[in-house]
Amino acid sequence: MYQINEFKQRESLDQALASKVADILVEAVKSKGKASIAVSGGSTPKGFFKALSQIDLPWANITITLADERWVAFDSADSNTRLVHENLLQNKAVAANFFHLKQDNILSEETLADLNVAAASMLLPLDVLILGMGEDGHTASLFPCSDQIDECFSTSAPLLRVLPKTAPNERISFSFLSLKESKNIFLHISGTGKKVVLNKALADTNIKEMPIRAFIQDPEINTQVFWAE
Ligand SMILES: O=C(O)[C@H](O)[C@@H](O)[C@H](O)[C@H](O)COP(=O)(O)O
């Protein structure tokens, strides 16, 4: 299920989402000494990253990772790791820990197995998950067009390799079953085009056709949608 929070200005959304996420992270650190957050890449979250980076938080006890990453070099314009380093791991958040999904040149079975062990012990369940959504209804790198779409929903491994057919780059993504355990889930989208996609996602039920449906229609999952015009 979902609740929608609508904003006229993207800047107001960025501030509101940053302050909500900050409160959750503070509470998590207070109660268990540490907190984890997975953010998404793409073009939408830059302003949110900047707003969150300026908040005074116990950053040294907070680990940031990505919901998914493209398997590209750090200096590539497509690197979500680079996006996070340039926009979120700045200002006060410079003290935060970053869990790197992109490791070696090749995403081998061994690398994936090591990442799965590390993610399970260090990050999961996530305290905060910020999802984005593509025009095709993908979220994280759960791509409807990929041969891995069944595995995206069925695997109990935290992470999997995905090869989208309609988007560039090999990907690594947290699986649906690991993402759905997140304690606080947000979907951050902006623009009228994304509102149309959201409405399309709400109008039908096939999750493999539009994976975002799984997060907004499952009664066991509570997704806070943050949308700005
Ligand atoms: O690395 C990625 O591609 C993502 O994490 C992906 O799931 C993204 O969030 C959506 O594609 C929305 O992207 P935009 O914000 O660019 O529309």
Image (tube, rainbow, N blue to C red):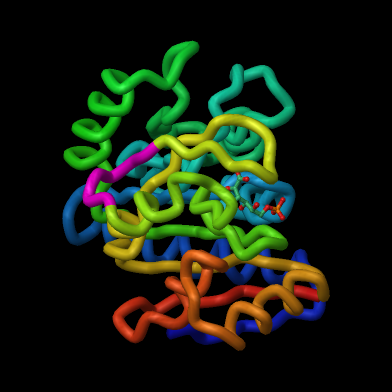
Residue 198, relative to residue 128: is it above or below?
A: below
Outermost residue toward the top in this view: 105
**In front of the other: 120 or 168:** 168
Indicate yes or no whether the magenta region holds residue 1: no
Residue appearing at x 19%, y 32% in the figure = 117
* Residue 27 at least partly seen: no
Q: Quadrant of residue 159?
A: top left
Name the residue rendered at 42%, 28% in the picture.
100
Give the image location of residue 98, x and y in percent.
42, 32
Residue placed most toward the observer, 228 or 59: 228
Q: Where's residue 171, x and y in %? A: 52, 35
Q: Quadrant of the N terminus?
A: bottom left
Residue 107: x percent and y percent?
42, 21
In front of the other: 198 or 80: 198
Q: Residue at x 28, y 45 (%)?
A: 158
Residue 132 vertical position relative to residue 1 in the rendered view, above or below = above
Image-based side of 145 in relation to 127, left or right: right
Splitting the image into 4 quarters, where does residue 177 fall? bottom left
Quadrant holding the C terminus? bottom right
User: Where on the picture, by quarter, is residue 59?
Assistant: top left
**What is the x, y in percent for residue 225?**
57, 76
Question: Which contiguous range is marked in magenta?
Answer: 155-160
Is residue 158 found inside the magenta-colored segment of the image? yes
Q: Is residue 22 above or below residue 100?
A: below
Residue 63 visible, this angle: yes
Q: Main secondary structure of the magenta part?
A: loop
Looking at the image, residue 142 sits to the left or right of residue 176; the answer is: right
